[in-house]
Structure formats: C-alpha cells, structure tokens
Image: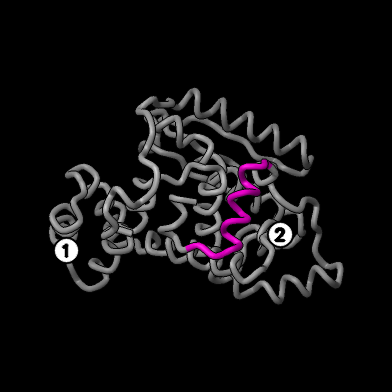
C-alpha cells in the first residue's frame, strides 16, 4: 500500500471542502434517525464536547464529537458509517441479545470490528488513498514501537522513509506512544483483511450485525442463531441497502486485496 505509485493507487482525494462539528452532529443525528426508523431498538445519540481532541469517538451508544473537529466533506458518509453504522449499531444489536458480552465484545472482537468499520468506509465510497495509506503507516509505526524504537525514531521512519508530512508523522507517532504505548492501531488493516477474506470465501456479513465478536466466533454465533437463541432484529444496517454499497460488496465477493479497494 505504501510503496504503490500514486498514479496507480486509485482515484485522487477530492475537494478540500470541510464540515465542522455542528454540521457533523446534524448529519449524525440524521443517520441515527434513519436507523431508528428501520429498527426502533436503535438507541444511538450524539453530542459535541469541548473536552476532546479533534475527532470523534464512540462510547456505548453515544457518538461524541470534539468541538474542534473539521473533516473533509467527501469523508462524511464514510466516517459516519464507520462510527454509527458499525460501532454504535453493533452495540445496540448486541445489547438487544440480553447478554452484555455481545455489546461489549467477545475476546478478539476488535480487529473484526475495526476491519468491518473500514470496510463500511469502502462500501459508502469514502475510502480514500490518504485514509488507506494512514492505516498502513500505523502498522509500520506500531511495528517500529514494538521493536524498541523511541518516539523520534518512529517519527523519522514515517517522515523520512514513508514521506509523510511533519504533522502527519507526528500525529501517527503520538497515537502510538500515548500512555506509554498503544498498539491498537495495528489491527485496523489486519481486521480489514479478515473481513475481505471472509467475504471472498462466500460468507455473509449478516452475522456481523448481531453484536461484537471476531470472525473466529462465527461458527458459534451461527449455531446460536440456528437454535433460536439470538435475536436478529435487522439483517443489515440501512447504509448497506443502497445500490452503490451492494455493487461494491459484489466486487469484494469476487476477491479484493486492501490496496484494490481504491479502484473498486
């Protein structure tokens, strides 16, 4: 992903038009209401907060948006599909099972959860070259950290070897070294690969929407569902029902690598 020539990595990122926290909140509310119209059990909510760094984060069924957030408009639908359409949606469906484990996550669920969320960005047409390079750079940076490199050394790899801007390299390194070292950023690309392999093997995504669990738990979850022990209120989140999303999903079923998602 990082070595691919820019001319061969898919469509270029689009305009620089941005969305602020207020508009982002309005768009999130609209998506939440759309989800609620499809299923009354969806209990998502959103709020703008002054005590968060720029960006968004999900806690339970709530999307929290920093008042300092500004994102590219063409990334809006993709980011909401990631946060609301996957993280909050599976929290609510998992909560509906009556077993907290399904809403908080079974062991090893995070890779599949984040991979599914990035896959949702692709399905909505918002997985850009910049975003995919960022996910790949985080893997390289995490490997550097785990191999004993200090903050400055990892920053140098991202800046000098991979060509990221000073700000970009610093922000990636900062995420990795916070709290003494936080390796979660390595799982996004790994999880995406798991989901792509799952889809290419001809397996359905439907069980993913029952709660938060890893692909390794699919046989167990499928058996629980076949015995009528799980509640399947909805088959898929609303964003997945669009013709564009279904077309992209069909391409993924034919087999795609992460780097090929930009051209699909």
Query: Which secondary structure type mostly characterizes the magenta part of the structure?
Result: helix
| Residue positioned most to the front | 7
Q: Which mark is residue 150?
A: 1
Answer with left or right where residue 168 lies relative to residue 18: left
Up-down relation of residue 77 to residue 175 (above or below)? above
In the image, 95 versus 77, the foreground residue is 77
Q: Nearer the viewer, mark 2 or mark 1?
A: 2
Q: CA distance from mark 2 to mark 1?
A: 42 Å
Q: How many marks?
A: 2
Residue on which disc 2 sits: 206
Dividing the picture into quadrants, the one containing residue 145 is: bottom left
Q: Secondary structure at mark 1?
A: loop
252 on left or right of 146: right
Percent x, y for residue 116? Answer: 55, 57
| Of the pair 78 and 61, the residue shown nearer to us | 78
Q: Residue at x 58, y 32 (%)?
A: 28
Q: Residues within 10 Å of mark 2 (few under 14, many from 20)?
A: few
Secondary structure beneath dot 2 equals helix
Q: Quadrant of residue 41?
A: top right
**Is 248 within the magenta?**
yes
In x, y percent, where is residue 159?
16, 52
Residue span colored magenta = 242-256
Q: Along the horizontal axis of the image, is 178 left or right of 71?
A: left
User: Which residue is painted at 66% across and 46% down in the image?
Assistant: 240
């Amino acid at each position: 992903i990082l070595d691919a020539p820019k001319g061969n990595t898919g469509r270029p990122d689009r305009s620089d038009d941005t969305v602020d926290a207020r508009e982002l909140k309005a768009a999130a509310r609209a998506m939440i209401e759309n989800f609620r119209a499809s299923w009354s059990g969806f209990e998502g909510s959103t709020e703008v907060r002054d005590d968060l760094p720029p960006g968004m984060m999900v806690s339970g069924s709530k999307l929290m948006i920093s008042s300092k957030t500004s994102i590219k408009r063409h990334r809006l639908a993709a980011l909401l599909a990631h946060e609301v359409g996957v993280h909050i949606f599976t929290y609510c469906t998992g909560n509906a099972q009556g077993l907290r484990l399904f809403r908080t996550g079974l062991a090893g669920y995070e890779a599949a959860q984040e991979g599914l969320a990035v896959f949702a960005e692709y399905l909505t047409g918002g997985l850009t070259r910049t975003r995919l390079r960022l996910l790949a750079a985080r893997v390289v940076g995490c490997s550097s950290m785990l191999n004993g490199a200090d903050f400055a050394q990892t920053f140098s790899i991202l800046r000098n070897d991979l060509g990221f801007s000073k700000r970009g390299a610093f922000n990636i390194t900062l995420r990795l070294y916070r709290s003494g070292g936080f390796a979660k950023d390595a799982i996004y690309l790994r999880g995406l690969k798991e989901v792509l392999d799952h889809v290419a093997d001809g397996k359905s995504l439907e069980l993913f929407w029952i709660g938060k669990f890893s692909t390794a738990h699919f046989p167990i979850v499928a058996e629980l569902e076949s015995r009528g022990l799980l509640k399947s209120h909805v088959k898929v989140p609303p964003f997945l029902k669009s013709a564009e999303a279904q077309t992209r999903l069909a391409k993924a079923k034919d087999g795609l690598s992460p780097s090929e998602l930009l051209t699909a």
